[in-house]
Amino acid sequence: MIGRRLVLAGGLCAPAIARAAARPRIAMLLWRGWEEACDGFRDYLHGRGIEAEYIVRDAGQTTAPIAGYVAELNRMRPDLAFVWGGSTALAALGRHDAPDPGRFLQGVPAVLAIVSDPVGAGLVASLDAPGRPVTGTIYVAPIEVQLRAIQAYRPFRRIATLFNPLEASSGAAVQALAGLAGREGFVLDGRPVPLVDGQPQAAALYAMVRDFKAAGAEWLYIPPDTFLNDQRNVLTAAALEQGLPAFSATERFVTYSSGLAGLVCRYYNIGQFAGFKAEQVLAGTPAGSIPIQTLTRFSLLVRMSTAQRLDFYPPLSLLRYAEAV
Amino acid sequence: MQTGARSVRPDAISDVIPGAAAMERRLILGVAGVTLLLLVGVTGVISRTALRSFEQEVRPEMGREAAAIGAAAAAQIERAVALGVPPDRLQGLEPFLGGILAGRPMLDSITLDLPGARTQVGTPRAGRAQDIAVPVRLGAGAAGTLHLGVNPQRLERSARDSKWDIAVVLLVALLATVEVLALLADRTVSLPLRRVERLQGRIAAGDWAVRAQAVGGDAAGRYLARLNGVVRRMNERRRHVAWLAGEVMREAPEARGPARAALARVEAQGFAQAAGFDAPVGREAPLRSPATARAPLFLYVLAEQLSTSFVPIYARSLDGGGWALAAGLPVAVFAGVVALASPSGAGLVGQRGARGVLALGCVPAAAGYLLAAAAESIGVFMLARAVSAVGYALITIACQAYLVDAPGDTRGEVGRGRSMAVFVMAAMTGALCGTAIGSVLADRVGYGGTFLVSAALSLAAGVLALRTMDGAAGRRAAVAGSGAWRAAMAHRGFRALVLCAAVPAKLVLTGFVFTLCPLVLLGLGDTQPEIGRQVMLYAGAMLLTVRAGAWVADRVGAPAAAIAWAGAASGVALLLPLVLPLAVAVPVAIAVVGLAQGVASAPMLAVVPALCPALVARVGVAPLYGYLRVGERIGSIAGPLVAAGLAAAAGFTAAVAVLGAVSLVSAGAYWVVGRRA
């Protein structure tokens, strides 16, 4: 943490203008349009005196157009690609151990943002040494830190969670939580969302939540999961109706939906941190040697209207540092 | 420091000028008395004023601080309510208020009164407690109140601590004043008078060849200069008379008889050594006073003992409390290095003289303190204590050698015994002052800062030694061979003295007083100054009874009984924690151990010649005193380790009881063996 601050501080002193002789070209490969992480990324670089030319390509929440964007970018040869989301990254970059020059981005260093588990997803070999020109940020807090936050809100014995079985990273997060169950003395009720024709079923979510509650769950943990994120309104409304407090690893379940609480990285902040990584790449550091990191400070979000509906208020000691939304 | 002596003070001029010792003592006591009155008066007035303003300032200050704490807590509650938490649904109130209370000893209790509900943490105190009420706004006209109970004892304890600190500073100032006066009196009164006395004595004995050297400008110096003039004129007159007598005898043979008679009458006036008139002018040998080493020794012991009351606490904090023996190790390492370094120190004194070695010893002592101040691990701290121990070994050896050599007069063993007492008193006064002021310092500037003060003081001791001591003294300190050791340890009575008296005494001192006491007192919630005051009881009590011990040894003639009784008393004192509350038993035991060891310190040395006269005749008494010291050092090394180990295994009370039992059994064994021998 200190090291990172020192790097930031040192960077502030460096003459930023000198290296920006030509405007760098940055491809923004996005999943659902330009949002806060992109704002944070752009604002950081702007603040550092890097006025880039942004080439924005939006996948529109489906992987179908990504192959076309990759082919286009391979021709354009931008200086850097900002890749938003795990699905986008996997479609654009492929697994680190299965290179395919014909399908994936070539010769363009990539900076990841809003990715929860790049190693589990096979994007890189390790966080400290990615092993390919890919660096970036992780946007979820370590699972143990999240668990402490849930326990600080209200201790529990049984917690339920669900995940899209097609998303490796959300399954990995549930596995990590299950690994803590024995030591911490709780029971984890983790179930995959049922698939029909190879697609997760949003219609099944309400019944799942109802069953969780009936089985005695005290909390619903929502892992980082693109499918669940898309269905966040359905999911959190079901939890609210069933009287099950929902704790989320990512921001939108609380800020834009009716989830109770979450220990999250703010998208804007993670975008800024990705900007810091991009700055290093633009300055000439090989992307493969820049570690992939998460923030060291997270935001504890509490939706007070949900707390009132559930009559499930946070303790005073937690409210001291929580952000009420 | 080492054990005591046969008598009390070197009344440097008492043997020759009747009443001079009394004069010197009256001088010191008079000046010290006046100083005491002035100091007590001035500090009394200042402390009274300070304490009153302390009450006036601190009490409202504590109220304001409590109000600020309360306002911050109220703001948290108000925020929760503003965010939509109904006042009757506030979650985790007790842990929240408890967390605020936990870190603040100034608060006794916090009570939150909300409409229809009350949450309280801690226990409010009846009586003088201050109740600070802070309103909690709950919106829509509703309100609650947060009550903070301020602990009155906190205030009283602060005031009491300040009073004690002032008393300790006053005591140290007085004792230091006495030390400085002793040095000044020795240099400006006693030493010049002794020179005058010696010169007069030699003249009275008919030695007219003598002259005072280095005559100063003070009264004694002017007197010496006049005496030189008288000697010169008398020599001239005598030469003149002799010449006249010679002339008369040559010119008038009939007057030979009367002339020879006149010459004889001149001789009869005390000019016995006629040769003295014409002998070359003799140099006055320098006078060595043991008192010149007293001030540097006092300063050094003060420096060393500043840390006595917190070394185990500091060690344990550096170790993180993980290792049971950690608290005892630095004390043991210190004693061990002293034992190892002492023999080479003795050799060094032979080469460089006591003054040089004393000054040299202050360098590693100071370096060790600096290292201790910077230590961040138990390993570095032990290294620091080891380096300081080298200094301790050099300084004590140098002082002993100086003392053996210093009384450059005819008083022999008696003078030596008295010189020894100077050292014991200086060392005990230094220990008393150091322990007391050290804990006050540690409380104010921290352990590291106190070690820095130690470093500065020990360097000052070295400079003072170079300025005041005689550079040549101490070179002929005797080093005994190893054969003497075997012979001594083969003697049953002497062996009993070493093993059953010297070893257990130090075992109790370093194990109980220096290692376990600071830790257990800290555990009882005492502040560092309170711990220091209690550990100080040892030196204070010992200072009181060293004289009594010397009296028992010299006049009553029962040194062996004194030693046995002292051991038994220490043993019984250490059993007190079994029956009394620790807060009472620990200081009482420390004081009793101090009293007992004070009584035994002089007899421990005095008993040797009577105990083993044949052995003394063969190897001399000095090596035997050395072996006693070896025994003491073995006890000093074992004490902290045994005590810390026992305490870790069986708890404080049991550990102290074991040490007490060892002391009791040893005293009994010494009594039985001593009687047979």
Image (spheres, rainbow, N blue to C red):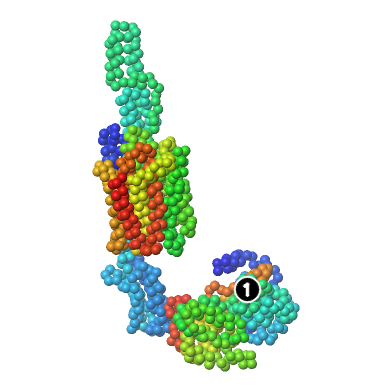
Q: Position of residue A67 (x, y in %)?
A: 71, 83
Q: Position of residue B303 (x, y in %)?
A: 40, 50
Q: How many marks?
A: 1
Given the image, what chain letter belongs to the residue carrying mark 1? Answer: A
Q: Is residue B273 above or below residue B111?
A: above
Q: Quadrant of residue B586?
A: bottom left
Q: Quadrant of residue B9?
A: top left
According to the image, label 1 marks what residue?
A: A126
| Foreground of the two, A12 or B429 | B429
Q: Is residue B578 left or right of residue A245?
A: left
Q: Quadrant of residue B616?
A: top left
Image point 43% across, 42% down: which residue? B482
Q: Is residue B423 left or right of residue A283?
A: left
Task: Determine if residue B496 is in view.
Answer: yes
Q: In which quadrant is the C terminus of chain B drawn? A: top left
Q: Is residue B546 above or below residue A15?
A: above
Q: Position of residue A170 (x, y in %)?
A: 58, 82
Q: Position of residue A142 (x, y in %)?
A: 54, 76
Image point 60% across, 81% down: which residue? A169
Q: Is residue A203 above or below residue B525?
A: below
Mark 1: amino acid: Ser
Furthest toward the left, the residue is: B556
Q: Is residue B182 above or below residue B590?
A: above
Callout 1: 10 Å neighbours few (<14), some, many (20+)? Answer: some
Q: Secondary structure at mark 1?
A: loop
| Foreground of the two, A174 or B401 | B401
| Foreground of the two, B23 or A273 | B23
Task: Determine if residue B162 is in view.
Answer: no
Image point 37% across, 28% down: which residue? B212
Image point 41% across, 44% down: which residue? B486
